[in-house]
Amino acid sequence: MARLLRKIGQLTLGTAVLTGVGCQRDSAETANASTSLTRVELQLDWFPEPAHGGFYQAAERGFYAEVGLSVEILPGGPGGRPTQKVGSGQVPFSMGRSDDMMLAAAEGLPVLVVAALMQHDPQALLLHADNPVETFADLEGHAVMAYPGSAWIPYLQKRYDMEFDLQPMSFGLARFIADPDLIQACFVTDEPFRLREAGVAIKTLLLADSGYDPYRVMVAHRPFAEANPETVRAFVAASIRGWIDYMEGDPSPAHERIARENDHMTPAQMAFSHTEMKSRQFVSGRSPVGNRYGHLDSNRLQEHADLLHQLGVLESPLPLAAYADLRFLPSNRVED
């Protein structure tokens, strides 16, 4: 992926002469401050995009630095493997879905959910506008392209007592565009914009509306979290602050950074994604008592783990402590 290089401003000779001693002192202080920060890495699940906006906002607005952290945000992609990287300890932090973390923990990976990234999952099914499928119950016998192993697949099949022709996911939209009968998993914050820009009329079925609604979450390597609890608390608090600032304030610091690191992200695409996340309350949640940025509900998590066991996705019941620890959340973000 092509990247745009940041331009580095240069001091003029005159300025250097006039302020040479002061600049030397300021440079030394800046260097000392930089080296005093705890360096950690965050592995993204895809190339930089607005779905990562709160992390970039926290970095660009200095929220991580204020809590003593220097966070390197690592882009993902088809081979990003965030769950495997955080599970193996290659990185201390990553992101993903709460159901995937339950499955990873059940398989013995030391992953730990420490905060919510989104209260509701923006994953959906993408259909051509004239496709006769209007509800999830209409999927019987239709070709659906998705990631094999996704837990929402047995959920839909069991809830609606149906089978559909599951096809492995391919990256891109060429197959979908070419086949008017194909249904494809997507994110409502992304693919709909690109298809409409290309003149393709589409509609979507948001998976959360079926009742299958996992969190999207921040994840830590469990041994790292146990050894460095204050670092994890600092990362979580600054990330939540970044997401609030990104969603409720001016998102341009994050968008400018994302555009530098992913030249496929246009201003119009980012504005669409940000608007979708805000209007659908994916990040803030839909609670009548106020926003839920970062919030995790232990009952909701456990109910979802129990559902996966009932579906046979999890072989045995999985207790909350096996995959999540709510003690890293700021106290006002915890609610049992």
Image: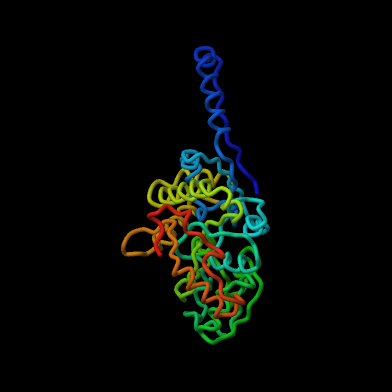
Could you tell me which residue is drawn at 41 percent across and 59 percent down? 334
- Residue 146 lies in what quarter of the image? bottom right
Q: Nearer the viewer, residue 189 or 94?
A: 94
- Considering every residue shown, the one lying at the far top of the view is 17
- Taking 159 as reference, is 24 above or below it? above
Q: Nearer the viewer, residue 24 or 325?
A: 325
Q: Residue furthest front?
A: 227
Q: How many marks?
A: 0
- Above/below status of 165 relative to 111: below
Q: Is residue 283 left or right of residue 23?
A: left
Whether 277 is drawn above or below 29: the answer is below
Residue displayed at 62% across by 77% down: 315
* Residue 278 against residue 318 in the figure, above or below: above
Chosen colour scheme: rainbow
Residue 205 visible, this orientation:
no
Image location (x, y in percent) of residue 172: 63, 63
Image quarter where the C terminus lies is bottom left
Q: Where residue 335 sits: x, y (%)?
A: 39, 62
Q: Quadrant of residue 111?
A: bottom right
Compared across the picture, whether 27 is left or right of 291 comes to right
Picture coordinates of residue 150, whole percent (x, y)? 60, 72
In-image side of 72 versus 55 (left or right): right
Q: Tell me residue 222's x, y (percent).
A: 59, 56
Q: Nearer the viewer, residue 309 or 246?
A: 309
Which residue is outermost to the left? Answer: 289
Residue 24 seen anywhere in this rendered image of the structure: yes
Residue drawn 59% across the image and 41% down it: 39
